[in-house]
Image (spheres, rainbow, N blue to C red):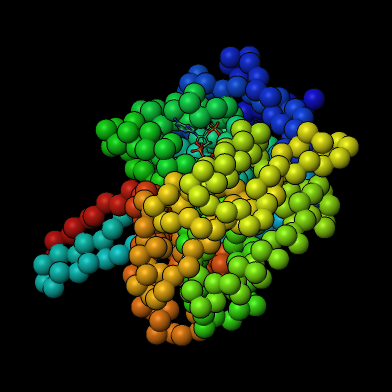
Amino acid sequence: MQSILHFINGEERPAESGSWIDVHEPATGLVYAQLADGDARDVDSATEAAHQAFPVWRALGVEGRSRILLKLADLIERDLEMFVAAESRDNGKPLSLARKVDIPRAVANIRFFATAILHFASEAHIMDDVALNYTDRQPIGVAGCISPWNLPLYLFTWKVAPALAAGNCVVAKPSEITPLTASMLGRLCNEAGMPPGVFNVVQGIGSKVGAAITSHPRIPAISFTGGTRTGAEIARVAAPMFKKLSLELGGKNPVLVFADCDFERMLSTTIHSSFRNQGQICLCGSRILIERNIYSRFRHAFVERTKALRVGDPKDHASDLGAVVSKDHMEKVLSYVALAKEEGGEVLCGGKQVRLDGALAGGWYLEPTVIEGLGPACRTNQEEIFGPVVTLQPFDNEEHALALANDTPYGLASVVWTQDISRSQRVVRNLRSGIVWVNCWMVRDLRTPFGGMKQSGVGREGGTEALRFFTEAKNVCIRY
Ligand code: NDP
């Protein structure tokens, strides 16, 4: 059985506790690895190593750090198939998706920040005949990075890469449910020539390792992606310690479909925005709002396309959906389907566990599910399900669409489908979400600010926003 260890001070190590956690393969439901069960002692060691390494990493300067990060990206690309297989096995996602999206985007994250740091500039504010102010941006020191299970390496590198590029050392924790690719990254950091202690991974569960990172007095910045409830707990602990905090949290994203949209393009993209990665992407659109005069046409076409999706072995290229990440998560999603029925919703298709044969008989597979007949206020339309489940609601006009779209505590992403430029602008301006896609979904330019409003988060990642987060600004005023 494979052991997945910490990566501390350039070495793979077991946990101080000597205990292990089972890691399951969602496709089969079987345990395939043992994970180091870390705690505060391991976080202490990693933090000490990171502090020791900080002066060395900082002294390399932006060019030295950039070179090492670019090498790291090349090494992941060299080992792409190994990473693809590991991500698919650990998470249950189709191999084809890991190959097309997860691992290439992780490589792109690292390359992007390795080169962005070369172009990162500070402001100068010149007071005529009085003084010159300039902003000096220094790395913070040691950054804590905590990431979720849905896009394991992709979201992990989205934090770790800017933190390292900006000159910080990192103590990172992947989700205990999907720890494998983060641990593989450690070995490649050594091969890329990264000094020991710059990048550390402490494995284990959130309530021990995550909590120890959050409350550690020598980790002054926390970048977290995960659920809103966990984000609130992290803020509760970190805010009174005056830590820098970036929180990327949950969503309940609306997709607004106007009658004048390019119907075919909208339909195929909406299938992806509903069910890609088994609906386990924070950016998936889970509430589809449709202009009433095309509601029947949409419902018919969407349900037909959904029924045609194949749920199957993640290794099979023909599978559109693989397994969901865990048994608990599968049961949570199924409990929301039951809730939707109790609330008066009608399941148009899906709603059940899929039982596969042979080695996959114990795997956690769900049918893609479409529900209609529910009002905006019910729990099904308010709470994040984070699985292959969408609801349909009709709307009468722009105002009604906006009222429905904005009527949740979340504000992460929205999608608008219309050919009318003026309408798209009116709607976009009034949507309360940090990201809006018009006539597309998941098109990502890494320079753009990424994050949510309301209970979907605090702060933004991406581009200069991330580099600013991972540096401390100091104004220097020089009198003429
Ligand atoms: P969780 O909030 O459960 O976990 C996220 C990470 O935090 C995990 O590594 C977890 O560890 C850790 N953690 C748990 N408890 C604590 C704690 N008390 N202190 C510090 N860390 C802790 O989220 P999930 O992993 O279930 O991920 C799904 C969620 O992530 C969804 O809500 C989704 O919307 C959100 N998400 C948001 C994105 C965004 O960009 N806004 C992108 C992707 C996902 P462990 O796994 O060991 O419990």
Residue found at the very far top of the displayed protein: 18
Residue 220 in picture, x, y percent from top left? 36, 36
Who's the residue at 33% across and 48% down the image?
Answer: 472
Q: Is residue 129 left or right of residue 452?
A: left
Q: Is residue 116 left or right of residue 15?
A: left
Q: Quadrant of residue 230?
A: top left
Who's the residue at 65% across and 48% down the image?
Answer: 351
User: Does 456 appear above or below 393?
Assistant: above
User: Does 46 appear above or below 374?
Assistant: above
**How many numbered marks are there?**
0
Who's the residue at 60% across and 22% down the image?
Answer: 37
Q: Nearer the viewer, residue 354 or 191?
A: 354
Who's the residue at 48% across and 74% down the image?
Answer: 291
Does residue 142 appear anywhere in the picture? no
Does residue 254 appear anywhere in the picture? yes
Query: Quarter holding the C terminus?
Result: bottom left
Q: Is residue 242 left or right of residue 308?
A: left
Q: Nearer the viewer, residue 81 or 123?
A: 81
User: Does 46 appear above or below 239?
Assistant: above
Residue 439 in picture, x, y percent from top left? 54, 75
Residue 396 in picture, x, y percent from top left? 41, 74
Q: Quadrant of residue 359?
A: top right
Residue 208 in picture, x, y percent from top left? 49, 23
